[in-house]
Amino acid sequence: MTNTIGYDSWLEIVGDRLLPGFPGAGGDIKEDVLYAQFGSEKHQGTIFGEISGLTTERVKELAQIFESVDLHYEIQKDIQAFHISHTALAIVNKHFYTNDGMVERQNG
């Protein structure tokens, strides 16, 4: 979930079970075929962290699960700041996408 206005409404629903994050998966659809990509060190892995910024036991356990299947992850100390900055970046990136993929930079 990307939530730039805070987590209060989610906390009301799920309480302290909430562990905000951002998936390290994505891809493209070309000619009706999904080409999935999972986060790696080169590309963004899954990001998660406690709202408090603490590295709790459940954060450590989740990290171990990702490690056990060799998926890249990042424990984020300020997950809300990440969500805000990611949203800003996504808005800018949207200007460079076309139906044929990302616009290539032109030299000159």
Image (cartoon, helix red, strand yellow):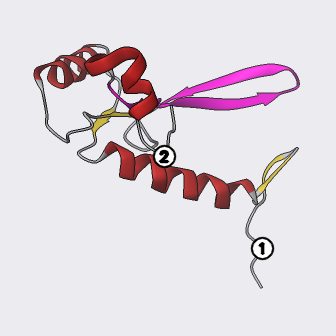
Q: Is residue 14 left or right of residue 68?
A: right
Q: Residue at x 56, y 28 (%)?
A: 37
Q: Amino acid at mark 2?
A: Ile
Nearest the eye: 80 or 55: 80
Categorize mark 1 by other alpha carbons within 10 Å: few (<14), some (14-19), many (20+): few
The image shows residue 47 at horizontal and vertical percentages of 36, 35
Categorize mark 2 by other alpha carbons within 10 Å: few (<14), some (14-19), many (20+): few
Q: Is residue 41 magenta?
A: no
Give the quarter of the figure containing the C terminus.
Answer: bottom right
Image depth: mark 2 or mark 1 in front? 2
Q: Is residue 28 magenta?
A: yes
The image shows residue 41 at horizontal and vertical percentages of 37, 40
Against 97, is 53 above or below? Answer: above
Q: Residue at x 88, y 25 (%)?
A: 31
Q: Is residue 105 left or right of residue 2?
A: right
The image shows residue 56 at horizontal and vertical percentages of 12, 27
| Disc 2 element | loop
Task: Give how far apart the Cα atoms at labels 2 and 1 are.
Answer: 36 Å
Q: Residue at x 47, y 29 (%)?
A: 23
Nearest the eye: 36 or 79: 79
Q: Is residue 26 left or right of residue 38?
A: right
Q: Which residues are magenta?
A: 19-38
| Disc 1 element | loop
Name the residue beneath numbered marker 1: 106
Can residue 61 be seen at all in this image of the molecule? Answer: yes
Name the residue beneath numbered marker 2: 5
The image shows residue 64 at horizontal and vertical percentages of 19, 18
